[in-house]
Image (cartoon, rainbow, N blue to C red):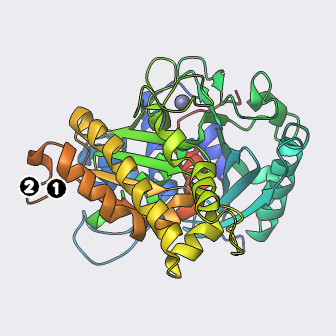
Amino acid sequence: MASTSRTNHDARDLLWTPSDSLKDANRRRIIRAVMLDPSSTQVNIARITGLSQATVSTVVSELQEEKIFRVDSGGGERGKRIRLGAVRGLAVGIEVNHTGLTVAARRVDTPRVESDTVDFSADQGGRIWVSESVRLIKELARKTGLDEDHIVSIGLGVPAAVDPRTALVTQVASSLEWNLGGDPRERFHEHFPGVPIIIDNEANLAAYGEYAFGVGKGDAGKNVETMLFVKASTGIGSGLIIGGLIYRGRHGLAGELGHLTMDPTGTVCRCGNRGCLETLVGGARLVEQVRQAYSGYRIDLPTGLESMIEKAKGGDQVCGRVLHDAGRNIGLALARVCNLLNPEIIVLGGELGRASELLIEPAEQSLRLYALRGMLDHPDPTRIMGSQLGLLAGAQGALGFALKADVTVGV
Ligand SMILES: [Zn+2]
């Protein structure tokens, strides 16, 4: 006797089948919302999709009947947990940096994320970043029990500004020592034919990751509305979430926190301007300050940002002081952003995010000195917080952002 209860639905059929009808579009949005949050409620689905409770309720019932959704019994109608039934599909996110990349993959029916990172030398990047991404995607897909034929979408975060209207790269970081080349999405088509690829700046997608799955996901799944995510590593980038959307600006250059002028007479920056925040608190600059302080002494010097942070945590006063001052300078830059945007939370991520317990206090001191009091002396003040997803924020954000986007054909 044939059983229909265990029928496996192919997520690609559910999301990719072309249709112009509004009803089908609503259905896809609701399925995507549950894939994004595999333990959702009707209230959350309505909030994420912008659809009415009545529409959500009708579509959820239909999808339950088709065994695409499972709805927990018990609890009020609105609070019931909605999960996917037997649906096979894989969502993928890639974060590409100057000297490495991270891939995250998740079955659309579970919250469990598989991820892996590879490092490469700066001069290798252009040659191997696509092949390494493809290799990791295939490896991680197998770990989930699926394969690359189940991929429904790929989010791609690149160290470049991306034009929000054309999805083409408008400005590559001047320090990137390899060529991203034309439309980076095209290089994945032969490997994953037909799979929609959504591209954005990697700090924007890290901001989205922290917003959707990290500290931005407030109590009861109610995300914050306005968030600034600071990605502080060798360079200082940031991503802005305003009203739940990534704010990119006309040329995709919004949020370039690292190039805020802090001292017009300061050091020339890699961007060609002078006295940018990055010339004060970029990773290499911080390590250089420690080396300078210890020059001439037989002291085990930090080899990079990570070891410097470890030393500071272990009580090294020079490393501690350099990070303290970095926190103050970052805070001064943040105060300017706060007076312009009044965000709900500021998240410190990237490699420096590992030192957030050392940076937050001096950064908050600067906010107290330079940001308007109304946002700090409020019962629900603007807060600076450490990242929850750490170095996975970018790949997870890319995964989630592409999964949410209602793109039905490969681009
Ligand atoms: Zn600059």
Label 2: which residue?
378
Task: Answer with left or right where residue 218 lies relative to residue 209.
Answer: left
Residue 65, given in percent of the width and then of the height, sits at 46, 59
Residue 106, given in percent of the width and then of the height, sits at 64, 61
Q: Residue at x 63, y 54 (%)?
A: 288
Q: Is residue 406 visible?
A: yes
Residue furthest front in the image:
296
Q: Quadrant of residue 380?
A: bottom left
The quadrant of the rendered image in which ligand 1 is seen is top right
Task: Answer with left or right where residue 138 lies relative to residue 36.
Answer: right
The answer to which of 123 and 54 lies nearer the viewer is: 123
Above/below status of 395 relative to 305: above
Mark 2: secondary structure: loop
Above/below status of 365 relative to 294: above
Residue furthest bottom in the image:
314
Residue 105, given in percent of the width and then of the height, sits at 68, 59
Q: Are marks 2 and 1 in contact (CB under 8 Å)?
A: yes
Q: Quadrant of residue 239?
A: top left
Residue type of the residue flagged with mark 2: His
Task: Answer with left or right where residue 11 lies relative to residue 38.
Answer: right
Dot 1: few (<14), some (14–19), or many (≥20) neighbours within 10 Å? some
Q: Residue at x 48, y 32 (%)?
A: 266
Dot 2: few (<14), some (14–19), or many (≥20) neighbours within 10 Å? few
- Distance between the Cα atoms at labels 2 and 1? 5 Å
Q: Is residue 18 visible?
A: no
Residue type of the residue flagged with mark 1: Pro
Q: Quadrant of residue 265?
A: top left
Mark 1 C-beta closer than 8 Å to ligand 1 = no
Label 1: which residue?
381
Q: Which mark is residue 9?
A: none
Q: Residue at x 57, y 55 (%)?
A: 289
